[in-house]
Image (cartoon, grey):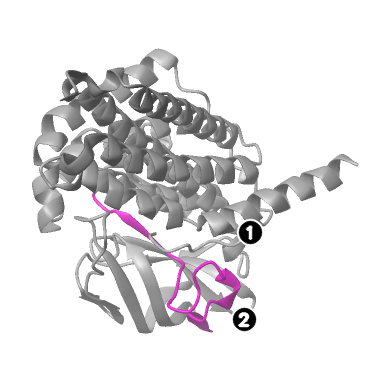
Amino acid sequence: SVAPGAGVWLPSAPMSVVPPTDPEVRDAIVDTVRRFVANEVVPVAAEHERDDRFPAAIVDRMRDLGLFGLTIPEEHGGLGLDLLTYVGVVEELAYGWMSLAGVVNTHTMVATLIVRHGTDEQRARWLPSMATGERRGALSLSEPDAGSDTRNLRCRARRDGDVYVVDGTKAWVTNGERAGLVALAARTDEGISAFVVEKEPGPAFEGITVGAHVGKLGYRGIETVEMHYAEHRVPAANLIGEPGRGLAQILGVLEVGRINIAARAVGVARAAFDAALAYAGERETFGRPIGEHQAIQLKLADMATRLQAARLLTRDAAERKAAGLRCDVEAGMAKLFASETAMELATEAMRIHGGVGYTTDLPVERYYRDAPLMVIGEGTNEIQRIVIARGLLARAREDR
């Protein structure tokens, strides 16, 4: 989701180990997505972004490519690939248009929540349609008065026989209007619990009202909405795991979201760097390409170094998460460093382009507008520093 929506790490059930994807298979999949982005996304991204129009045809092609089922186990209709493959795919999508990575982000987090904490019946009921993209997922955690402060959630779910009655408002819900499955955090008698809300795509559904799309600086073309619940009845069978354990479950899943944000940031940073590098070789001042001026060379060297460091941090976090290891610190580091790198590289790319970089004729200004989302999304970078520090201190205590 766009809002911070995440507090500090809480212990949760360890993620089941995902077998590493064969490197040749991973490379082939990422290369397929790279060609898809070059041929079908880049030529139309500016138009969709300018009009803030949902890219329905592109999303349909993403479904055809199996991108909604990348990490869903094969026994439930997915591809069963590891997070390192997912990270490579997300980077390529963001390279072409960052908003596309948001289409799969919350979807993948909801699927991960169900895989990790759902019952066999819930997995069989929901995952096959998620794997095909027939039903898309949205994560609903943040509220108007509860962003980073997740313990201040006010949305309530009251038990009434074999259903829970939900009342409250959720904010910053990415994919909220088009989603068919919404992972909802609500307060129950036992504490914060997680539910899967089944609804039809659209602005209203049996006690659910989807508010108007929030206007945004960047991250356009994908809806971000408020969702209002008024005595919406959720079957008790849709409760994920034990009552009162929802916050720990969702915060564990948010590690996947932070890795996604980091991969998105790498994609945007790479696009900004490639644009700057190409322009430095083409644009001439004082009788020679600007890339021959030392001032520009220093910028390019720093940009390339930060980009590589961000990519390696992101891949390390993905590998740890896939191996079932605790990675709150690593996911936080990757998200923090990669998002700040995207901000810096987008700014430097604009400076290298000069005046033309400020115009809408080139995508550089879009990178500049999209980059701040990664600094804020899935926990602000101020929150990431707290997550990292507390994780480090906890590990130090455990090692004594």
**Which residue occupies the foreground of this view, 93 or 322?**
93
Q: Is residue 90 visible?
A: no
- CA–CA distance in space, label 2 to label 1: 22 Å
Q: Which quadrant would the C terminus be assigned to in this image?
A: top right
> What residue range appears in magenta?
134-159
Residue type pointed to by label 2: Asp
Residue depicted at 85% across the width and 47% down the height: 397
Residue 138 in percent (x, y) is at 35, 59
Residue type pointed to by label 1: Val
Q: Is residue 360 visible?
A: yes
Mark nearer the viewer, 2 or 1: 1
Q: Which quadrant would the N terminus be assigned to in this image?
A: bottom left
Examine the rendered structure and indicate whether residue 322 appears above or below residue 180. above
Q: Residue 189: which disc? A: 2
Residue 314 in percent (x, y) is at 50, 34
| The magenta stretch spans residue 275 | no
**Which residue occupies the foreground of this view, 353 or 342?**
353
Residue depicted at 41% across the width and 25% down the height: 298
Q: Residues within 10 Å of mark 1 (few under 14, many from 20)?
A: some
Residue under pointer 1: 8
Q: Residue 41: which disc? A: none
**Which residue occupies the foreground of this view, 334 or 246?**
334
| The magenta stretch spans residue 151 | yes
Nearest to N terminus: mark 2 or mark 1: 1
